[in-house]
Image (cartoon, rainbow, N blue to C red):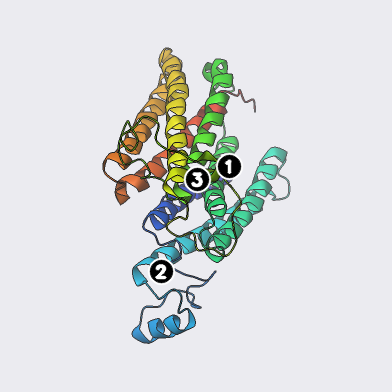
Amino acid sequence: MKQLHKVALFAAAVAFVVIVLGAYVRLSHAGLGCPDWPGCYGQLTWPAETQEIQQANEAFPERPVESGKAWKEMVHRYLAGALVLLVLLINYLAWKPGRRAGKIRLLAAGLLVLILFQAALGMWTVTLKLFPLVVMGHLLGGLATFSLLLWLAWRARPLDSDHENLAYAPYRTATLVALAVLIVQLGLGGWTSANYSALACPDFPACQGQWWPNVNFKDGFVLWREIGVDYEGGVLDLASRTAIHLTHRIGAVVTFLVLGLLSLRLLSRPQTRAGGTLLGVLLLSQFTLGVLNVLLFLPLPNAVAHNGTGALLLAATLWLVHRSHPRYE
């Protein structure tokens, strides 16, 4: 299982880079940098020469070539394609004759199904012109792929001791609750980003100079909307975006309290102090980056770091879930 463990870890690292790069593409408004799929303006790369750009503009007059956006989108697609190949390799290793790890095989097969669906979501993100539900699903699908790859790597790792996880076992329920709360919050973050609501409240801790401004939750959380509309830049009014933003803020406070309490409990015991420290540092970093997104008006490096740290926080919480379940070889 050593080979499978190493490949899965490498694939998880690639998945993390894909998540961060995807955030960069989305936040730099390059999600429709290529109006077709899987190519870009009918090419395997992207239009770069003057003649290629002219031909692309004639073929897609509704969306003229912006080279700075097109190459970002295609690099993201190439890396995502490499991740698909790595998942295929993982399945080959997991299903080799003579291997008895049934759970590992199920994980590998689930990963393959997930990443193929993730590729479909990537296509629909373009063809449905940044349809918010698809954009949020694509983000969560990337996080799920990253999480399953990590879980597979951890399950395939040979243990040094049969009892190495017992120190975290008393915190299993609290860790599962923390994971559930974090997943909901990540979903709210994805919905906030997909609807361009990150700056609906341009101040902190108040919102538009009030503690409770005008909000429209009914329209803000309509998941299924009209197909064919170009959703780039968002279509919701300010009250709807404010409702989304405030919900994400409230979720951030709840998440901070739940994960913060778990971190403090882990810090109270020497055997679990490393896990508590890791969780606490990532939690504080993520909360700080979220506040800075508002105060600094969503600077691109900070916003991308917010997405990346969210993925790392998910990985740390999932690691605690793994460590809290005793394994026996």
Please state which amino acid type lies under the numbered disc 1: Leu
Please state which amino acid type lies under the numbered disc 3: Trp
Closer to us: 253 or 202: 202
* Cα gap from disc 1 to disc 3, whole angstroms: 22 Å
Q: Point out the frontmost of discs 1 and 3.
A: 3
Residue 71: x, y in percent?
A: 39, 68
Residue 163, visible in the rendered structure: no
Closer to us: 326 or 3: 326
Q: Where is residue 233, by image quadrant?
A: bottom left
The mark nearer the N terminus, 2 or 3, is 2
- Tell me if label 1 and label 3 are in contact, CB under 8 Å: no
Q: Mark 1 points at which residue?
A: 148
- Tell me if label 2 and label 3 are in contact, CB under 8 Å: no
Residue 92 located left or right of residue 18:
right
Q: Name the residue under label 2.
A: 70
The crowding category of the residue bearing disc 1, from other C-alpha atoms within 10 Å (few below 14, some 14 to 19, many at least 20), is many
Please state which amino acid type lies under the numbered disc 2: Ala
The mark nearer the N terminus, 1 or 3, is 1
Residue 257: x, y in percent?
A: 44, 22
